[in-house]
Image (tube, grey):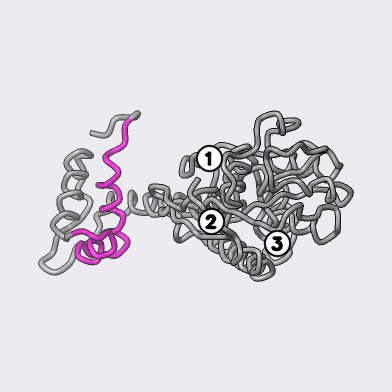
Amino acid sequence: MVRDDKLPPLPSIRAFEAAARLESFSRAAHELGTTAASVSYHVRQLERQTGLHLFVRHPHKVALTAAGAAIAREATAAFAVLHASFVTAQDQDEARLSLTTLPTFGTSWLTPRLGLFRAAHPDIAIELELSAEPQALGDGRFDAAIRHGLGEWRGLRSVHLFPVVFTPLCAPALREAAGGLDDPGRPLDVPLLGRPDWWALWYRALGVVPGPPPERFGTSLAAEHMDIAAAVAGHGIAMGSPLLFRDEIASGRLVPAHDLVAGDGCAFWFVYPVARLQSMKIARFRDWLSDAAAAEVAHARDIVECAVILDP
């Protein structure tokens, strides 16, 4: 007998519902991806647990009993409601894309362009979170991410965007004061800004070792876009990406303080779980982002091709 607080096993109910709706154990087996014997087994288990005869078995077909017909109507309606709830949830999920990205990439490059994606895909709302540390994907918080590295993350599909390259940048008024950059031992009238490891690598690309001493650096800031903001204000020479800050250079707010562009072999990547390969919202954003990144690289082809790439 069926207790008030406990349903029969769901696989048995599912097998019964399919057999009742299709009036065939074999057709039900085909729909469920199993065998007619398995469907028959689950139906018998259901009959045994309920104490009801649900089907009349004939040599080449089955027919519902009155009790079976009564249960089948409710079971089919219940599965239809359940199916509709999944469709609704999928539609709602496809209408919202949650991204996590690096602070500088998100602030300086991605955010100013997101309006173009929204104009092309007004049915997809974007939620963007900035994080210096890689956030987990696949736990429901984020659909995809933009990461910095070599493109190898277990369980994730990686799409290359553009390389990480950097060069000294400063306000036009400081261009002359930056003339002594070639010699890290030569005193400068203006401090350096940005990551010391990038400065050290840039000097290695220049053929100068060691890099600048600690006393050459000014204020230590948490992210590259903050270093660039300080450089625009005339507070120092920042090591930054000529791709991420192309608008600042094009507008004249920043100028290269040296001709050499270096890189560490890393790149920016759009990543998402392999399990989400069929997601249309991810595919649409991936394609749009790939095109935007390709346009960026094409615009800065001379910079990318001339960059000196070294191991970090």
> Which mark lies nearer to you, 1 or 2?
2
Name the kind of residue labelled 3 in the image. Answer: Pro
Is residue 76 rendered magenta in the image? Answer: no
Say what secondary structure mark 3 lies in.
loop
> Which mark lies nearer to you, 2 or 3?
2
Side of 252 relative to 218 (left or right): right
Residue drawn at x 68%, y 33% as measured from the top left: 222
Q: Quadrant of the N terminus?
A: top left
Q: Which residue is mark 2?
A: 309
Q: Position of residue 212 (x, y in %)?
A: 65, 37
As drawn, the label of residue 122 is: 3
Q: Which residue is mark 1?
A: 134
Residue 285, image quadrant: bottom right
Measured Cα–Cα span from mark 1 to mark 2: 24 Å
Name the kind of residue labelled 2 in the image. Answer: Ile
- Residue segment shown in magenta: 6-34
Is residue 33 rendered magenta in the image? Answer: yes
Q: Is 252 drawn above or below residue 220 in the view shown? A: below
Residue drawn at x 61%, y 46% as measured from the top left: 203
